[in-house]
Amino acid sequence: MAIASPRSKLGKVYLVGAGPGDAGLMTLKGKALLETCDVVLYDALVSDEILAMINPIAEKIHAGKRRGNHSLLQEETTQLLIEKAKEQAIVVRLKGGDPFIFGRGGEELADLRAAGIEVEVVPGITSGIAAPAYAGIPLTHRDFSSSVIFVTGHESAGKYRPQVEWKAIAQGAETIVVYMGLHNLGEIVTKLQLAGLAAETPVALIRQGTRADQSELIGCLSNIVDLVQTNQFAPPAIAVIGNIVNFRKQG
C-alpha cells in the first residue's frame, strides 16, 4: 500500500486588501484568490458581502481587532499564518482597506519572510480615499486643496517615536485625513488648533465608509467633539479636516 509523503513545499500567503466595505470595490485579483484559497484569516471590518466570496470549503478564521476586543493578538495572527502556510497551498490574510495603509501589513510581511514563507501583496482601496469620495468630498481640488496627508489617530505603545507631530501635520498639507481618530478626537483637534489651524477649519467625520449605512457628521475644529457626543457618533470613522470639506456645499 502506498504511503502519502508529507508536503515538503511551503504554501504562499497573500496579503489581500478587502477595500473599505462596498463589495464592488474589491479587486478582481483579490476576489479570485478568495474563490480559490484554502484558508482565510480575516479582519473585523471586512463586510459580509466580501466574506461571501470565500471558497465555501476553505477554512475561515476571524482574526479581527477592534478597540478593546482582539480576537487574536498580532503575534498569534502571524504565527497562525506561518502554521497554515506549512499545511495549505493558498493562504489569504484578508485585511480591511489596504494592507499597507495603517493595516500592519508591513509587520506581517516582514515576519512571514523571516520565517521563509513566500508572500504576495494584493493592494486594496483604502477608506481614507473611498469614504470621502462616497461623501462627495474630493481630497484634492484646484480651488481647495493641492496636498493631502494621511495620519493615524490611534498609535501603538512602544513604537518608533512617541507621537504624531501634529504641528508638522497642521502645517504640512491643506487636507488632513485621520484614520481611527474618533476616540482621541478631542486631543487631536486641540493640538491642531495649537499648531495654528483656525477654529473654523471644517471637519467631516465619515462612518462606515462606502457601506449602505454610511453617515457623515460635519462641523469644525471648535465644535466637532460636542457634535460627536450630541449625535452619539461612533466608530469606525475617519476624519477629513480642511477647506475641501466645503466642496460638499457645491452643486
Image (cartoon, grey):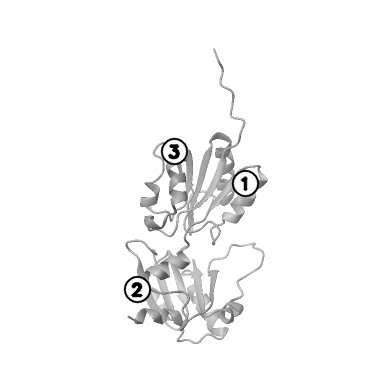
Q: Amino acid at mark 3?
A: Ala
Q: Which mark's residue is nearer the viewer, 2 or 3?
A: 3
Pointer 3 local density, CA inside 10 Å: few below 14, some 14–19, many at least 20: some
- Counting residues from the start of the chain, the first of labels 1 and 2 encountered is 1
Identify which amino acid the numbered label 1 is placed on: Leu
Using residue 147 as the reference point, say whether residue 56 is left or right of it. Answer: left
> What residue is at 59 percent from the left and 26 percent from the top?
6
Q: Nearer the viewer, residue 46 or 188?
A: 46
N-terminal-most mark, 3 or 1: 3
Q: Is residue 206 left or right of residue 82?
A: left
Q: How many badges with numbers are in the image?
A: 3
* SS category of the residue bearing label 3: loop
The residue identified by callout 1 is 112
Q: In this picture, is 57 found above or below 75?
A: above
Check if mark 2's residue and mark 3's residue have beta carbons within 8 Å.
no
Q: CA distance from mark 1 to mark 2?
A: 43 Å
Q: Which residue is mark 3?
A: 58
Q: Answer above or below: position of 57 versus 183.
A: above
Label at residue 13: none
**Residue assigned mark 2:** 231
Neighbourhood count class around disc 2 (C-alpha, 10 Å): few under 14, some 14–19, many 20 upward: few
32 in relation to 193, above or below: above
